[in-house]
Amino acid sequence: MPNRKWHPWRHLRRHFPHVDVNFVDHPTHGDLGRLTRDGIEIDKTSTQTERRSTLSHEIGHLERGPVPTDPFFAAREECVVEELTARRMIRLPDLVDAVLWCQGRADDETAEELWVDPDILLTRIRTLTPGERKWVEHQLARRSN
């Protein structure tokens, strides 16, 4: 893995140059973004961090293909894409650094430090594998002393 943060705008330009990003009003559906036939729509009132997280999530949908129409499988697909997004956006060393900087908390400040929205941070923590969790805990213990 390269030793730099995930850059969704660069990834989109490199791998999906034909996909446009449009900033729009989304007053009714409640999401900060969505993939449409015309490209990716992102709520124009979202913060830069929310835009980065939303774009990363929608890129995941581009890469995986259409969301199933069945509600059960659609919900599962959303969970998979959200986990992939969190893994892509938060490298384990960065997670350790941010948690230490925020005095052991995983909250809004920690998310801001990682330049992700709080949902992405919580997804990353919730979906740590046992090996990742052990590594993170070891690093936190080692560096807290």
Image (tube, grey):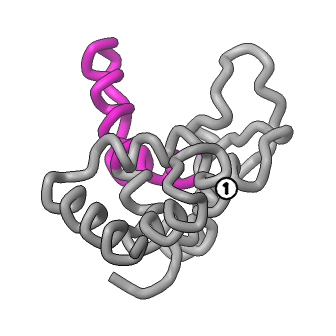
Name the quadrant containing residue 110.
bottom right
Relative to 1, does residue 19 appear above or below in the rendering?
above
Query: Would you say 115 lies left or right of 45 here?
Result: left
Whether 29 is among the magenta residues is: no
User: Could you tell me residue 69's position as x and y percent?
Assistant: 34, 18
Residue in view at x 67 percent, y 20 percent: 30
Name the quadrant containing residue 143.
bottom left
User: Could you tell me residue 25's position as x and y percent?
Assistant: 83, 30
| Quadrant including the C terminus | bottom left
User: Could you tell me residue 29's position as x and y percent?
Assistant: 67, 17
- The one of 84 and 138 positioned closer to us in this rendering: 138
**Magenta-colored segment: predominant secondary structure:** helix
Relative to 136, does residue 14 appear above or below in the rendering?
below
| Quadrant including the N terminus | bottom left
| Residue 119 visible | yes
Relative to 122, does residue 71 appear above or below in the rendering?
above
Magenta-drawn segment:
54-83
User: Could you tell me residue 67's position as x and y percent?
Assistant: 37, 30
Whether 79 is among the magenta residues is: yes
Residue in view at x 67 percent, y 51 percent: 109
Q: Report the residue that reaches farthest toward the bottom.
A: 3
Residue at mark 1 = 112
| Residue 17 visible | no
Q: Report the residue that reaches farthest toward the front.
A: 145
